[in-house]
Amino acid sequence: MKVAALVGLVLLTGCSNTSPPVDAGAEAGLQIVLASAMPSRITEGSALPLKVVIVASDGTTQDLPMGTNVTWTLPETVVAADPTDAGMSALPAEAPLGFFISNPYRPDRTDYNGTLFVVQQGASTSPNLVVTATVGNMGSVTAQVPVYPVPVGDPTNGAALYQALQCGTCHGATGAGSPPQGDGTYLLGDASFTYPAPGLNNTTDDAGNPNLGADPTWNAALLGMAAQGSIDNSGVALRLPMTDYLGAPNGLDGGTLTSQDFADIYAFLVTQTE
């Protein structure tokens, strides 16, 4: 197996294929790479758009031919559960933990394919997620993704992000959730829905259930996964009008939202007790 390292040793990729394109060189292979700008490190809470490229014998790369089918086989693909009848849904438990997502309840989402959601580092001192893709009739390719701990959150920056992203429009200024309107509906943005935007702060709802910031089954990495993957910490689909924050600008410096941003927002939410 031929092994190459991308800039900063952030993503280690191994190349193997059975039928390289004739124009890619006799020793051509396949490589999994990031499809967008590379983060300084991949941490819990990251969402990584991946793609497979052809690596020629001289080390140059080119995109796959248009229409080539890429199937991501490792890690597993989590199919979002029905939000109206979730049953006993749960995310996988193994660590290091990452997965792809399929969400039939969010037909507006066109950015799931090839996006790896990194959730948990696990107990290993040097955890690596193994990612494998099968590429048409060209064979398969495997990558190892090193996973670092979730960043420490800054609640002040998180408050600014929460406001800039207009999270309070649906979830309330302090993350208390959307109150009922009295007719069984909830105002989310400028429209009425039959379900609420859940509470995100460090309190409980009227039924005594903990909001996200008070619930030990949530954490900063899972908040990042939920905001970018439109599923909750049990794998249940988050319905519209929940915004798709994958690759979204953060509203402060125009950069793409990162695991640090979600760690900051989470740090802000756990300070909110109203």
Image (cartoon, grey):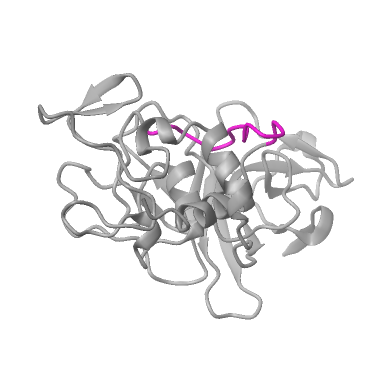
Region in magenta? 242-255
Q: Which residue sits at x=80%, y=50%? A: 27
Q: Which residue sits at x=40%, y=30%? A: 169
Q: Tell me: residue 98, above or below residue 50.
A: below
Tell me where residue 161 sits by quadrant: top right
Depth check, front residue: 224 or 55: 224
Tell me where residue 190 sits by quadrant: top left
Depth check, front residue: 161 or 126: 161
Q: Quadrant of the N terminus?
A: bottom right
User: Does 108 sit left or right of 88 as displayed?
Assistant: right
Magenta residue check for 251:
yes
Q: Residue furthest top?
A: 190
- All told, the count of numbered labels is 0
Magenta residue check for 246:
yes
User: Does 43 sit left or right of 209 as displayed?
Assistant: right
Q: Residue furthest front?
A: 274
Residue 131 in percent (x, y) is at 57, 58
Depth check, front residue: 141 or 49: 49
Residue 224 in percent (x, y) is at 50, 50
Q: Residue furthest left?
A: 183
Q: Which residue sits at x=62%, y=60%? A: 43
Residue 268 in percent (x, y) is at 52, 52
Q: Residue furthest right?
A: 58
Q: Tell me: residue 14, above or below residue 216.
A: above
User: Does 188 sit left or right of 148 as displayed?
Assistant: left
Depth check, front residue: 119 or 193: 193
Residue 246 in percent (x, y) is at 53, 38
Tell me where residue 214 sits by quadrant: bottom left
Q: Tell me: residue 174, above or below residue 92.
A: above
- Residue 214 visible in the displayed image: yes
- Residue 261 visible in the displayed image: no
